Image (cartoon, helix red, strand yellow):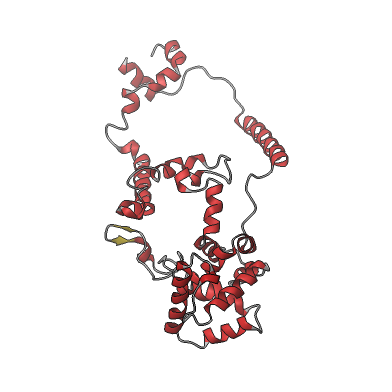
Amino acid sequence: MSDRRAELESASWSGRTRPYDLIKEGVAALVVITIAVVALSTLFGSPDDKQITFKQWAVAAPADFYATSVQELAGSSGTGGYGAPYNTASDGVNLGPLHLAKLMGVTHPVDTVNDFVITPLTTVVNSGPVADALKQWQASDSKTQSTWATNYDNALTKANQDATKVPAGNYGPVPQLATGLLSMAQAGSLDGALLSQGNYFQSDYTKQTLFLGDGSYFNDQSTASNLQGSTWGMMNETGRYPGQAWLWLYSFWYQIPPFNNGDSHPFGANADAWIMVIMGALSLGLIIMPLIPGVRSLPYKIPIHRLVWKNYYQEENL
């Protein structure tokens, strides 16, 4: 039987054939799918929610926006302490002694103080208390600025983000700057001011996304839409709509120990890096599978294909 099989495999195909117009079938399938996609998208539209704006955030959760603005000035926000590629505040994720982000360096610099607060305010404020606060801030050295912002950030945290309960202290112009930015956001002008930082045709929304992500409001919206990693969020559209099912293999690792243990475990704190290595190893294994002795002969040892094409093998007596 094995000699017969080897002979057939080395010989030209002499079995039954039938005409098949592959181009015709492909065009027909493309037309049907195109009509279905256009019709369904017209009837149902996109399941995605509208984008979240700074105005929406500042109106819906003013205390959270105000506290986040203070954190940006103090450098205590998530972005402020992120590290590469945005700043040098931390070493970032690592694979043992290898700090991947740090090796790449700061390739997309983000200054939370100026990019998120000071520069936007200078585009709209010309007079009044906020303008005076800007002048006082810009006339001070960085050490004094840091002291003001850190003092007010700590006091605001102790007051549970209630600015009315913050005791008097050495805060400099920080309260006025945060109030000015809140008013600017509620008026709807902060979105445009942040977007204008860059080229004339701006397509980089990194800074806006980082600023939004530093507050609690954006995270709460993600939780409500089942987009957190603990709910396999990277696979979902907003709401409960199915998303990119092919991402399940990536998302799977975030659901199991030690990768879901958070900062309490080295693998949890650096889950992104370790999962990247795991997926890289699995992908490499898939690519070189035909070259691995023993693995490449599995189809002969586990002949599932003979069950799929059992009629053919019976007719050909193989």
Q: Position of residue 250 (x, y in %)?
A: 42, 44
Exactly how many numbered labels are in the figure? 0
Please tell me which residue lies in front, 277 or 7. 277
Q: Residue visible at 43% across and 44% down?
A: 251
Up/down of 280 relative to 68, above or below: above
Answer yes or no: is residue 118 visible.
Answer: no
Q: Left of 189 or right of it: where is 178?
A: left
Query: Measured from the top left, where is residue 237 in percent x and y?
Result: 57, 45
Q: Residue at x 35, y 44 (%)?
A: 284
Instruction: Pick the quarter of the image with the C terminus.
Output: top left
Q: Position of residue 224 (x, y in %)?
A: 55, 48
56 shown above or below 120? above
Image: 251 above or below 60: above
Q: Residue 293: name its quadrant.
A: top left
Q: Name the residue at 54% across, 73% down.
A: 115
- In depth, the one of 164 and 307 nearer the eye is 164
Residue 130, by quadrant, is bottom right
Q: In the image, is 96 to the left or to the right of 312?
A: left
Q: Residue at x 48, y 87 (%)?
A: 140
Residue 91: tell me if it is visible: yes
Task: Work out which quarter of the rendered image holds the N terminus and state it.
Answer: top left
Query: Whole-percent x and y of residue 196?
Result: 62, 71
In front here: 274 or 302?
274
Find the residue positioned furthest to the bottom.
139
